[in-house]
Each structure stands twice: as structure tokens, then as C-alpha cells.
């Protein structure tokens, strides 16, 4: 299988997965670069997976569906601008010979879902949209901090080897913030150097992995003592997991 991040807009990745003949795409905010990639490798688009309703994730869905006949799958409780099969947690999508499980991960949007398969070429794979980024997480546009924390806990519980396909290249900015929160995290400093090297060569920093994110992503580390201490200096009123998470998200929102 081939796993390819197609760049779109300023910093989106439209993930293309294919076996040399059949393909799926995740969150195609724009149809043109996907059609170009399909034509280049003579691929038949079989499925379009949508994680949430934002235009940078759905803008190309209907054009792609009409051009290719691909079937569209999306979150049951969100509005997607094309006919689609509505999915809830517990549903699965069978495509390209793979079995994707649907996870509810509300927070960035109210009905956001993620797609997880335990075995793609022998290792797990996650498409998480705008819920989890490398070194960060999505903004809380529709959900509560408690919802987002529960969603991230669900993703953090996946196997460490899970490849994490995020929908934006936000990594270097996220790591700058992460180091401001945890300046003593040596894994984080090493990962930042690694990612700077990738970006200097024009390479994506993704996919990441769950094991990597648990070591370096402050939003997956909100119960670690050094992190709680740092957040308390930002907001002295924190008193439980949810308020630590909420204050950390607030700190990131205003970080420059
Ligand atoms: Zn979004
Ligand atoms: Fe987005």
C-alpha cells in the first residue's frame, strides 16, 4: 500500500491511500490535486472518508464523487455537501481490503469522527482529521474541553505503533509551544530537531505515531507533573484534569 499526503491550501494534507489500482482519500478539501494524483498513477477512487464538516476538509468531496463514482463516508451528525453514508462510533468501513473502525472524537467539531485500522501492511493506521496534530490538537470550535480531553484519551489508548495521519502541517509551530510548556523534555527537543530537518528538505513531518505523541505532545501529557506545574503558572485556578486541559488550550490560543 502507498500512503501519500497530498498538499492543499496553505498547510492541509489530503491523505491518499492506494494499492496501485484502487484508492481512498481522506478529507479532500480540494478536488483538483486529488484528481491529478489519481490520473498520474491511473488509480480508481473507491472511497472518500470525511472526518468533519469544515470546508477545508469537504470542499472537493462532491466534485470527486461525481468525477469518479467513489462512495462518500462521513460523520452522521454533521452536514457534508454530498450524499454520504452516515457513520457513528462502532461502525466500520470496508475498502481497499482494509477494515476501518469509526471513532467518535468530538471537540474540534461536535460530530468529528476518526478512522482507525489495526492492520495496514502489518501496522495500525489512524486518520484523525483536526482532532490530534503532531505536538498539538485542534481548536475547540464546537466541543467542550472535557469532550476533547476524552477524545484525545481515546486516541492515546491506541497502540503506540499506530501511524497518525493528521490533516494539517502544524508541527513546528506546535513544538515551539510545547517547548515553552516543557523546556526540560529531552524527547521533545530531539523531535523538534528531527522535524526541522524534514521541513528544511521540504518533507512532511507526518505521519507521526501514537508512541511519539505521548512523549512530546502537551495535550496528551496533561496529567504529567511538570506539565501541570507549568500550566498552574499560567492559570492558578486549575484543579482537575479538565481544567488543566482547558487552561493549556487557552495558553496555546494566545501563544505567540
Ligand atoms: Zn477543521
Ligand atoms: Fe482543517
Image (cartoon, rainbow, N blue to C red):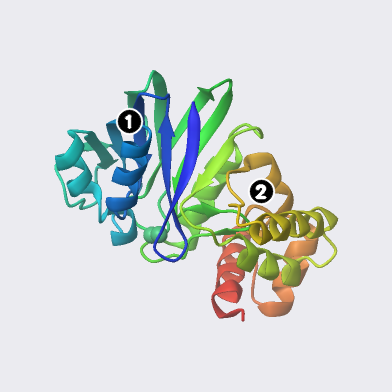
Q: Position of residue 137 (x, y in %)?
A: 54, 58
Residue labelled 2 has its Cβ within 8 Å of some atom of ligand 2: no
**Side of 93 relative to 221 (left or right):** left
Tell me if residue 66 comes above or below residue 110 in the rendering. above
Query: Which secondary structure lies at badge 1?
Result: loop
Query: Which secondary structure lies at badge 2?
Result: helix
As drawn, the label of residue 213 is 2
Residue at image position (48%, 55%) is: 148
**Side of 51 relative to 153 (left or right):** left
Tell me if residue 15 comes above or below residue 20 in the rendering. below
Instruction: Identify which residue, 58 or 255, lies in the foreground.
Output: 58
Q: Residues within 10 Å of mark 1 (few under 14, many from 20)?
A: few
Instruction: Identify which residue, 73 or 224, lies in the foreground.
Output: 73
Q: Position of residue 174 (x, y in %)?
A: 62, 65
As drawn, the label of residue 146 is none
Q: Position of residue 128 (x, y in %)?
A: 46, 45
| Count of numbered labels shown in the rendering | 2
Q: Is residue 35 visible?
A: yes
Residue labelled 1 has its Cβ within 8 Å of some atom of ligand 2: no
- Distance of mark 2 from mark 1, alpha carbons? 35 Å
- Which quadrant, please, contains the C terminus? bottom right
Q: Is residue 84 visible?
A: no
Residue at image position (60%, 54%) is: 134
**Side of 181 relative to 138 (left or right):** right
Which of the 4 image quarters holds residue 163?
A: top right
Nearest to N terminus: mark 2 or mark 1? 1
Residue at image position (73%, 69%) is: 181
Quadrant where ligand 1 appears: bottom left
Q: Give the residue number, with chain letter if any, for mark 1.
A: 42
Residue at image position (52%, 33%) is: 125
Q: Nearer the viewer, mark 2 or mark 1?
A: 1
Amino acid at each position: 500500500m502507498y500512503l501519500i499526503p497530498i498538499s492543499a491550501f496553505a498547510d492541509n494534507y489530503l491523505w491518499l491511500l492506494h494499492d496501485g489500482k484502487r484508492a481512498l482519500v481522506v478529507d479532500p478539501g480540494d478536488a483538483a490535486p486529488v484528481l491529478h494524483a489519481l490520473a498520474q498513477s491511473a488509480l480508481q477512487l473507491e472511497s472518500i472518508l470525511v472526518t468533519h464538516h469544515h470546508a477545508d476538509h469537504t470542499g472537493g468531496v462532491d466534485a470527486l464523487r461525481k468525477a469518479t463514482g467513489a462512495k462518500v463516508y462521513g460523520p452522521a451528525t454533521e452536514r457534508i455537501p454530498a450524499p454520504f453514508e452516515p457513520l457513528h462510533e462502532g461502525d466500520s468501513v470496508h475498502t481497499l481490503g482494509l477494515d476501518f473502525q469509526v471513532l467518535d472524537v468530538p471537540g474540534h467539531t461536535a460530530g468529528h469522527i476518526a478512522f482507525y485500522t489495526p492492520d495496514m501492511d502489518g501496522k495500525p493506521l489512524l486518520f484523525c482529521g483536526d482532532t490530534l496534530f503532531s505536538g498539538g490538537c485542534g481548536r475547540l470550535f464546537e466541543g467542550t474541553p472535557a469532550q476533547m480531553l476524552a477524545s484525545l484519551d481515546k486516541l492515546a489508548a491506541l497502540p503506540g505503533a499506530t501511524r497518525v495521519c493528521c490533516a494539517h502541517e502544524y508541527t513546528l509551530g506546535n513544538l515551539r509551544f510545547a517547548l515553552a510548556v516543557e523546556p526540560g523534555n529531552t524527547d521533545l527537543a530531539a523531535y523538534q530537531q528531527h522535524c526541522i530537518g524534514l521541513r528544511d528538505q521540504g518533507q512532511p513531518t507526518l505521519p507521526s505515531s501514537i508512541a511519539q505523541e505521548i512523549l512530546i505532545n502537551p495535550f496528551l501529557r496533561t496529567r504529567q507533573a511538570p506539565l501541570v506545574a507549568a500550566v498552574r503558572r499560567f492559570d492558578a485556578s486549575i484543579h482537575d484534569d479538565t481544567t488543566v486541559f482547558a487552561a493549556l488550550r487557552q495558553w496555546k490560543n494566545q501563544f505567540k
